[in-house]
Amino acid sequence: MSTDKKVRVRFAPSPTGGLHLGGVRTVLFNYLFAKSQGGEFILRIEDTDQTRYVPGAEEYILSCLAWCGLTPDESPTHGGPYGPYRQSERKDRYRDFAEQLIQSGHAYYAFDTPQELEAQRQLVPNFKYSHENRLQLRNSLSMDEQEVKELLAAGTPHVIRIKMPVGETVGFHDMIRGAVSFETSLVDDKVLMKADGMPTYHLAVVVDDYQMKITHAFRGEEWLPSAPVHLLLWEYLGWKDSMPEWAHFPLILKPDGNGKLSKRDGDRLGFPVYAMNWTDPKTGDLTKGFKELGFLPEAFVNMLALLGWNNGTDQEIFTLEELIREFSIDRISKAGAKFDFEKAKWFNHEWIKQSEDTRLLPMVKEVLESHQVDAPVDSYVAEVLALVKDRLTFVADFWEQASFFFTPPMQYDLEAIKKKWSEDKTNFFQAIIPALEAFEPWETEALEQYYKDAIQASGLKLGELMLPFRIMLVGGKFGPHVFDIAKLLGRDETIVRMKKGLAAILA
């Protein structure tokens, strides 16, 4: 275990594409643990696989974390005392440790060409480079020492592989799963240094965690099969006493619980799985994100936190500060968490309801602009927002719920009222329209009382005359309190719409 009292955790993504919500949850759990312990959260970019590097992916990752409010204490952009924070910039640090492993007999040079390895895969089903066949392959274990020296001196391309021991059991205590153990004979000899001189994840993660004084290493459970290699590297490099505590988070599952949630599932079922929009620079393909769909970052973070964690109560709405205060690793489930997009939308709805109108106003004005509406004064938009906010799942829903405040209805849902229309109803509206033209004060309560008194005096039923009034103003059977609508539209617009609506009914 680490002897460093200061908690230091890290998120170490590869810059290869969009950031899956599972990756963001890993960030979140790391961040919450660090902050709950008064510790530090580090972002390290693991870009050792240059063949998979995607331009713009690192900037995208940083943008996602910034949107979520999960700001690293140390990162490639923030700097810090243990930099550099890109593995490609730490390249010269790894070779010596790989050579140290060779000298101690825990690793070896392998000179097999890609073509030779492919030939083995064709011959042997599920081929893996291991204790079972390494003496029959081209490496420093099967060759004599002089031949190896000559190949190295000639600059022959080679990799360095860990020499997995035979018949041993290695294990560790997982903070979520408890005791975890592995049979070393079942693990292949992973590559530690590639032919291009770059380390693989296995070597780099151990060296970097040691040099950056990482105290806790949290990652998804899909990394569990790598654990025995990493355990042995900590031991073989003489750093066992500095090894961080580990926890492997449960998977985020498909909505039906059958397997890990993937981008393909989102495409198939119609919801995003990336934090933000990601455009593949090679293909130009756009993968939509939660941000652009209209999720508030607080809702996205809140939703992610409860995918596999709870604080032991029925509370579901948490601010980031509350999550930090409540978070503990022992409340993370071992079982996978099913992703429920309807529940995700519920979180967003709740956060929109709780948000200050001033926070939402700029986003609402963007919605209006997207519909070619020149937004009226902010005070009017804010009043409309206050009326419909509780009806919004996404800010973009503002148009569907409130468009009639900005543009008059072009058509009317008359089916429900035309069947029961009567001359008495015509007479009622022909009388009340001119009366409203002179009515004061034009306020919600006064309008409502006046309208209802007029209905009572007419001898007609309240329910028969409320729906036609609403349809005249908005075009359909929806919207907030109808007298709030009339109040905000103002006298002149209300009268114009009532006249036009009555004409449509009578047509």
Image (spheres, rainbow, N blue to C red):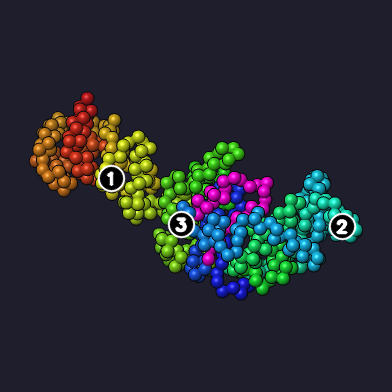
Q: What residue does disc 2 label?
A: 149
x and y percentages locating residue 461 in the rendered image: 16, 41
Q: What residue does disc 3 label?
A: 69
Q: CA distance from mark 2 to mark 1?
A: 77 Å
Q: What residue does disc 1 label?
A: 378
The residue under the point 45% across, 67% down is 326
Image check: 370 left or right of 339? left
Nearest the viewer among 105 and 352 is 105
Label 3: few (<14), some (14–19) or many (≥20) C-alpha neighbours in 10 Å: some
Q: Is residue 284 above or below residue 314?
A: above
**Mark in front: 2 vs 1:** 2
Q: Secondary structure at mark 1?
A: helix
The residue under the point 70% across, 56% down is 199
The residue under the point 89% across, 60% down is 145
Residue type highlighted by circle 3: Gly
Among numbered discs 1 and 3, the one appearing first in the sequence = 3
